[in-house]
Amino acid sequence: MTAAAAFQAPVHSQFFVELEEVTLSYGRGERQVAALGLTNLRLTKGDFVALVGPSGCGKSTILKLVSGLVNATTGYVYVAGRQVGAEPVRVGMAFQNPTMLPWLTVRENVMLPLKIVPPFRAQYRAKRNGEFRDRADALLKEVGLANFGDKRPWQLSGGMLQRASLCRALVHEPQLLMLDEPFGALDQFTREELWAIMQDLWTKMRPTVLLVTHDLKEAAYLANRICVMRARPGQIIDDAEVPFARPRTIEMSYTPPFVALTQRLRELIVSARPVKEAA
Amino acid sequence: MSPQFRRHIWSGLFIVGFFLLWEALCWAFNVSDIVLPKPSQIIATMIVRMPALWPHVLQTLYTTLIGFGLGIAIGIALGVLVGSSRLAYDVAYPLLIGFATIPKVAVVPIFVLWFGAGGVPAVLTAMIMCIFPIVVNVATGLATTEPELEDVMRALHANKLEILWNVGLPRTMPYFFASLKVSVTLAFVGTVISETVASNRGIGNVMMIASSNFDVPLVFAGLLILAVLGVALYAIFSVIETNITGWAHRKDEMALG
């Protein structure tokens, strides 16, 4: 479908993000590997959905599909009502690896999306970026990196880099935020601190978030909904609302309903494991 | 005294010692000037003949720099082409290696055939000598860019050019400057080869004539000049490298806990 045709096409989906009968496989013919079995997923605007499941279940693949980095083999991916890519949606991404550019300062790294994404791009090129500096500094302050804007990434610890990476994912006010295990490589305390920060930022900015994680507690703390996936073929086997009131706290995660939820998710994942690997 | 300063002193002493040993051995074994002149004699020759040598020094230097400049331009262009796609890398690499393995002396007669003896073949020889390391390094730097860095950019709907400009090229700079240090000395080799074979100017030509006149001290004076120029250019690009790509040579003691 050409861009012009897509532009005139009617709105296909009332949901902000919709995966309709999507499958994805790599390779061709005999050696074809299915990364994602038949999948349906719907996100309303401003929702916060976590994807949990074992390694290789296609969690990250869903993120890549929604952000337009890979194309579905069959089925349709709609973002903002139209096929992915047709509508200019601002996307923010953060990975397990903070992927800061080492030749830029932390502030310049955070400002990177403003340099690329319209409508900020034009203003950035016109050198009127003082306002952007303030915006980056405000975000850095919010995650506890107030005086680190002029430092180089390699002068920061892993947890600090991950905070900066969150700032970079949010600086251009994305409508869609893709988080691929962003807290996975951090120690328990830093992780819990960043959950609280993430929750604050989401409450304030309300992007639509897809969070991929291995950590069930993290999913239950942050998300409105948790989708449980199984591997080979990657599929969503459960889609559960998280009923807890916000703002959520670490103390909450020790209450019986919270523990019961994570228990149930855990059992779902374990029981869906392919039999030959159970031993 | 800092450890670095001490290292500089030691390497300085080592160089001086090398020449003193050379001088001493020449005295001890009474070596003839025609076989191996003494360092003192070489330096004296260089100083005495400098007025006549100077235009040749300049000729060699600027031939080298022009060739080097052309080599950088073409090297970057080819490197970006080869490094920016897997296909181009696989397709172009064998041919590049083929060109790189040709001894460059063998190419000089062809250039002379096309452009006549003189400055042009020297510039071209210097250029082809220094292209290959630049191409390989730029291409490697681009080809090994972390896919996640590109994913960040692609998710922002950055086009190929923006990714190249904001991620690919800056990331390649340390590789590029490392290759410049090597290339500038290679460009020198290229110039001198060509001057030796087909030119009536330049240090290479002076050495060629001197050796056919058995003026061995002058041959060595030429060598010494080439060595000094080569080291100087290497040092200049080394300094530029550390200033521009300092982020790649980070010091761990500066990192925070």
Image (spheres, coloured by chain):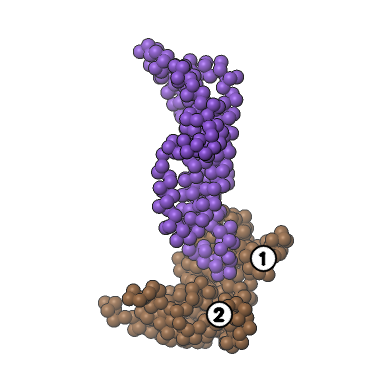
Residue A108, percent from left and from top: 62, 59
Q: Residue at x 33, y 80 (%)?
A: A273
Using the rendered view, name the quadrant where residue B243 is placed: top right
Q: Residues within 10 Å of mark 2 (few under 14, many from 20)?
A: few
Q: Residue at x 29, y 77 (%)?
A: A277
Residue A31, percent from left and from top: 34, 74
Q: Residue at x 42, y 58 (%)?
A: B90
Indicate the colour of chain B. Answer: purple
Query: In the rendered view, does A109 fall on the left or right side of B96?
Result: right
Q: How many marks?
A: 2
Using the rendered view, name the quadrant where residue A102 is placed: bottom right
Which residue is tagged 1?
A121
Q: Residues within 10 Å of mark 1 (few under 14, many from 20)?
A: some
Which residue is tagged 2?
A1
In whole angstroms, how far apart are the C-alphas of marks 1 and 2? Answer: 27 Å
Residue A246, percent from left and from top: 57, 81
Residue sticking out furthest to the front: B113
Vertical arrangement, residue A180 with respect to residue B221, above or below: below
Foreground mark, 1 or 2, reads 2
Location of the N terminus of chain A by quadrant is bottom right
**Element under label 2?**
loop
Q: Nearer the viewer, residue A13 or B189?
A: B189
Label 1 vs 2, first from the N-terminus: 2
The three-letter code of the residue at mark 2 reads Met
* Residue A54 showing in the rendered view: no
Location of the C terminus of chain A by quadrant is bottom left
Q: Nearer the viewer, residue B84 or B6?
A: B84
Q: What chain is colored brown?
A: A
The three-letter code of the residue at mark 1 reads Arg
**Element under label 1?**
helix
Label 1 marks a residue whose chain is A
